[in-house]
Amino acid sequence: MTGVLAVVRKDLLSELRGKEGINASVSFALVILLIFSFAFEPTDTDVRKLSGGLLWIAFAFAGALLLNRSFAREIPNDCLDALVSSPIRGWELFLGKALASFLLLLGVELLCLPVYGIFYNVRWAKVFWPLMLVLVLGTWGLTVLGVSFSALTVNLRLRELMLPLLLYPALSPALMSAMILTTALLGGEAIFGATAGINTAWLRMLTGFDIIFTALSVALIEYVLVL
Amino acid sequence: MLSATGVWKYHGQFPALLNVSIEAQPGSCLALLGRNGAGKTTLLRILAGLSSASEGQVRVFGEEPRSPRARRRIGYLGHGIGIYDELTARENLIHFGRLYRVGDPAATADRWLERVGLGRVPDARAREFSRGMRQRLAIARAFLHEPEMLLMDEPFTSLDDRAIALLQSVIREAVAQNRCVVLSTHQLREALELASDVALLDRGKLMFAGPRTAAMVADPGSVYAAFE
């Protein structure tokens, strides 16, 4: 775990000092939420049914900006070579990168939630803990896939374009689950327990997605980095 | 200590290395010579575990170069300096000290900062350093964990006088301590002064491998001339 913590510490320190990814990501998420609030009437009941989806659209787009930086941060000064030639194992490097990005992205999401509540007239605080569970699971899925594709596209000149093109189709099961669960929570439905109904299946799908793609990424990252 | 046997590397259909075999022993300094495009960087990246050979076998301390145990014993200095601009000099070295499982990363970082003449600016960010200071920090990063084998790609390119003197001093010290140094370069004079052995590559083929001779030092250009 020493390698994981070293990478987490270094990535958080670099990003919090440079703020390139965070500033872009927060601004973009807030602008999307603002624009959608102009486009739809937030007090309309039907529109509020879509608000979970709108929230995750903002998170997914803002997340791509942040996740793109995960491995791109290693390009200046050929830091990726220095990192990959060190004795850190592939899975340590991946988990370190993923944890740092996850914490940053979760921070961005928590900053956006109050704005979302105001613009869409949504009382998310009353379902804070179940909502946090969905946020954590959805964000981890987004992060795992985003960091994997960030590693895959790090040497491409058009990586800013390639990452979203690869990320969103592959992410669709997790994104769909997170959207449905968020909308259900904000609509007063349970997402686990006897009264949860179909929502339990979506929660399982989101959890399964996270487990499968974390395992795949950990297993394959070494082959992605060393050609 | 280091052996590469029958190594081929293809970039698509293009063969960058053709059946290259080299060896290096403890206490030796092997200069990989060759003009641009000879395959020096490709070979060095394979030895460092940054790239895999298409065919052939590479062993470092009897293990695959990608094994973490082998990598812990290797120091790599590539074309780039491998330093994070947003971190301070000390934070950079501590970070790599942690990755290499150095016993006391902070104390080791401080010792190396003094050694490379950056002891007075440990808390300045690397982006604020001059080119020469950044290069000295990169040397400290590569030598920080006292590697038994040093792989350096064009280490003298665009170094200032102070950094060249420092690098030559740490390389000589490493060889004297029975460590192995492999450096690729087309700057013959600096390399031949340090080298105990020479390997010459030309368009991916190994043209010569053997001990460095006094004649090579006296007339560095003769190394290329003899095999063209």
Image (cartoon, rainbow, N blue to C red):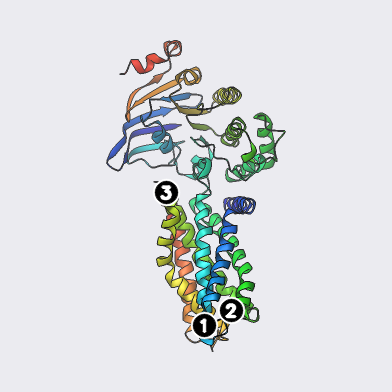
Residue A81 position in % (x across, y down)? 49, 42
Q: Earlier in the sequence, mark 1 or mark 3?
A: 1
Tell me the amino acid under the disc marked 2. Answer: Tyr
Residue A9 position in % (x across, y down)? 62, 52
Residue B40 position in % (x across, y down)? 40, 31
For disc 2, the neighbor class at 10 Å (few under 14, some 14 to 19, many from 20) is many
Say which residue appears at 36% left-offset and 18% top-offset. B224
The disc label shown at residue A212, or none: none
Tell me the amino acid under the disc marked 3. Answer: Arg
Residue B39 vertical placement versus A168 (above, below): above
Residue B201 position in % (x across, y down)? 35, 26
Q: Disc 3 is attached to a residue of which chain?
A: A
Say which residue appears at 55% left-offset and 27% top-offset. B159
Query: In the visual, does B54 lie left or right of A175?
Result: left
Name the residue nearer the viewer: A227 or B137: B137
Q: Look at mark 1 in the image and give the residue it sits on.
A: A47
Q: Are marks 2 and 1 in contact (CB under 8 Å)?
A: yes
For disc 3, the neighbor class at 10 Å (few under 14, some 14 to 19, many from 20) is few
